[in-house]
Amino acid sequence: MTRKHMELKDTHTIEAACDFYMRTPKYHALSLRSKTDYDYNLIRVCKTKVQNDKQLGNIKLRDLRFKHVTVAYDKWQTTVGIRQANYTATCLSIVLNTAIRHEALVTNPVSLVQRTKDKIRKVRWTDAQVITFLDTAYSDWKWRSIGLIIHMAYEWAQRVGDMRTLQWSSVNLSAKRLDLEQSKRRAEVHIPIDDALCKMLAEQYETFGFQQYVVPAVEPHNGVYRPYPSTDIHKLVNEVKAHAGLPPDITAMDLRRTGITQLVEGGADTFSIMQVSGHSNPQSVKPYLVNTLSGATNALSQRKK
C-alpha cells in the first residue's frame, strides 16, 4: 500500500485510503504495537473478497456500500473470531472517517454495522498448563520466542501485546527489574524479575541482545528482526498447544486474567494488584474478583491474626 500523493479523492480505492491514513500524523502518533496491529488488520481489510472475486481494497470510495462492509464483517467473524472482527472493523472505520474529513467520502458504512458483542471470557490457565506449554516451547528453537512471550505475560500479568513488542531498554537484568510503559493506557509498571525468568532473559540476550526487541521472530524479515505480528502469535500458540496436548480453549489473551486472578486469590490487596497490572482505577480490578475457596480461606485467616 504505497502512493506518493497526499490528496485523497472519492475515485481512490479503499487500499489507497488505507495508505493515505498511514501517512497522517494521527497514525504516526500511535505506538509501535498499535501501528503493527493496524497494518495487519488493514491488510486483512483490503484482501477480503466481498463482491464475486473483487477484494474490498479494490473498491473505490464512491462505490463503497453497506453490503460490502457487512459481507466483509461476516467473513471476519468466521475466520478470526468476534473480537478480532470487531477490531478489524474499527480499523476500517478509522480509515473511512479520515476519508470523510478529507471530503473523499460522505458517510461511513461501518458505523451502520450491527456488531456482535464478544462474551466476557472467564477462562484461566492452570499452573500445570503453563508449565507444560513452556516445557514444550522451550524444547524447540522455533518456539523459543513464543515461549518467552507466554512466560513473561503469565509471570508479570501483562498483556501479550506488550510482551510481543518488549524492548531491552525496559529490562534491567543486573537489577532484576522490568520498567514498562504499557501501550494501552501508557501506565508505567515496575516489576521484579525472579531468578528463573532472569536466567531465560539472560540467555535470550546472548542471542538477540544485538537488536532492540527482547522476543523478535526467530527469523529476520529482509535482514531485520521485528516482533511477531499478533496474528502469528495466535498461530504459534496453537501449534505449541496442539503439540503439548493442551486444550484448545485456552488462549494467550487469557494469561493476564490468569495472573491477576491468582494475585487476588493469593490475598494481594487491590492497590498492590494495580501496581502490577497498571490499572489506574480500582473498579477495573473488580472483574478479576472471583469467589473461591482459597480466597475465602485467606480472608478468614486474616481475621484471626
Image (cartoon, rainbow, N blue to C red):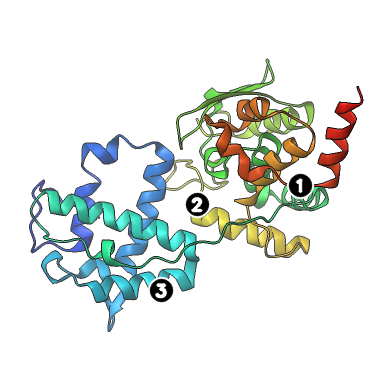
- Residue 46, given in percent of the width and then of the height, sits at 29, 64
- Residue 93, given in percent of the width and then of the height, sits at 28, 56
Q: Which amino acid does label 2 sit on?
A: Ser
Q: Quadrant of the N terminus?
A: bottom left
Position of residue 58 in the picture relative to residue 278 (left or right): left
* Dot label at residue 291: 1
- Residue 10, given in percent of the width and then of the height, sits at 8, 61
* Dot label at residue 128: none
- Residue at the image position 66 percent from the left and 55 percent from the top: 122
Please tell me which residue lies in front, 59 or 236: 59
Residue position marked by numbered label 2 in the rendering: 230
Position of residue 242 in the picture relative to residue 79 (left or right): right
Single out the residue that lies furthest toward the front: 303
Question: Mark 2 vs mark 1: which is more N-terminal?
Answer: 2
Instruction: Please say if the residues under marks 2 and 1 sit with CB atoms less than 8 Å apart.
Output: no
Marks 1 and 3, how far apart at CA: 38 Å
* Dot label at residue 75: 3
Q: Which amino acid does label 1 sit on?
A: Asn
Single out the residue that lies furthest toward the bottom: 52
Check the image and report above or below for 118 versus 19: below
Question: Mark 2 vs mark 3: which is more N-terminal?
Answer: 3
Q: In which quarter of the image is the C terminus?
A: top right
Question: Mark 1 vs mark 3: which is more N-terminal?
Answer: 3
Q: Which amino acid does label 3 sit on?
A: Lys
